[in-house]
Amino acid sequence: MSTLFKNLFDRPFYNLFLDIVHPEVIQFDRELFLKMIFTQEFEQLELKERMTYTAKVLHKFMPADFDAASEVLISMNKLIQASGSKSLLGFMFLPEYISMYGLDNLKSSVKAMEAVTQFTSCEFAVRPFILKYESEMLVQLKKWSKHKNNRVRRLASEGSRPRLPWSVALPSFKKNPHLILPILENLKQDSCEIVRRSVANSLNDISKDNPNVVIEIAEKWRGISKETDSIIKHGLRTLLKSSHPVVLNYYNLTSEQLMINSFEINTPIVKIGDYLEFQLSVTNQSSKNQLFRIEYCLFFRKKNGENSMKVYKISERDCKANSTITMTKKHSFRIITTKVFYPGEHQLKVKINGKESDLKRFLLIE
């Protein structure tokens, strides 16, 4: 994770936390707390490591008994919410504390997560509990999916995703996604967009291991509402990118009457920091209008010299009968903190409704 995010954990942030937490909730030796945070070790830590480190320091000031500590966490959370603080990411050391020190106390941890997630998400913290107490947590997740608070409902779907990014996978749910389908069923028409988006992300996770399950859900939910149709489209995105034939057919993305007339790279040599530019021309040879899903596949050179492909969507558009679409596209190789570019030969191809062009090559230089 980037340096920018890890610097959320700075001296003003910790001073804010200490200002918010009332002495009636917990007694802090302010100077000692800050001294224990700002060590040489701390300066070298990244974002997730700083969350964990902060939880460890906090633990030294908390009650040893987790039942009592969980009540302190809930009180802290109320004070933080009342303060109007917007540092949601920074305060994720509170869920981290629950996952680190509450794993042997399910009842108190569930109560604390339900409260804390209403301010800063417990989607990562809940997963060790699912791994250890699967049957109990499935019951709890279903309860949370009907909670009055949208952030708790989101925890039910996001926390149970089989492949949540930056977190441990849930092998049981990868193998048998039917275990979590009742949760998604409860939330498929949720009034909150962030909850519906989480449902879509869970479906997308499921599609990577059990594509037929998601295809069946798509058929079942199709046309219920514009919201469920949107969930389906987002949940099928990986299958669309991989040109799954059933999913292409589901969206009438046929390629029989499609012709890729030309595909050329305009910048055969690209300097890191500049743009790759390419153009293509595609014709609908049918006597009927045709929906085109236009994508390109970039094969990035890795450090070991092998390639790693990533698919990018350009657009979905209607192409009139017996007509041609021509377009030019740019892809940035601007240096960013989350992506490393390696000089050397890269490759590119385009896909329209799953139909692929020839592979083109270009050189990336420093």
Image: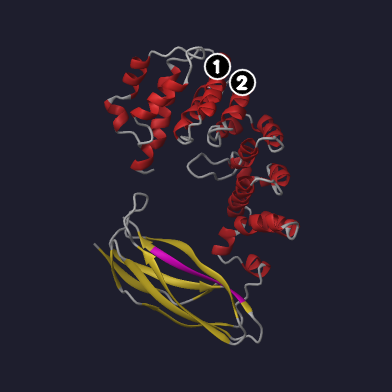
* 360, 280: nearer the viewer: 280
Which residue is pictured at 45% across the width and 18% down the height?
Answer: 59
- Of the 4 image quadrants, the one containing the N terminus is top left
Q: Which residue is mark 2?
A: 108
Can residue 99 be seen by looking at this rendering?
Answer: no
Q: What predominant SS class does the magenta segment belong to?
A: strand
Residue 293 sits inside the magenta stretch: yes
User: What are the residue bounds of the magenta stretch?
Assistant: 291-299
The total number of labels drawn is 2
Q: Residues within 10 Å of mark 2 (few under 14, many from 20)?
A: some
* 230, 46: nearer the viewer: 230
Q: Which residue is mark 1?
A: 66
Label 2 element class: helix
**Disc assigned to residue 246:** none
Of marks 2 and 1, which one's residue comes earlier in the chain? 1
Which residue type carries mark 2? Ser
Q: Position of residue 335 (x, y in %)?
A: 31, 56
- Of the 4 image quadrants, the one containing the C terminus is bottom left
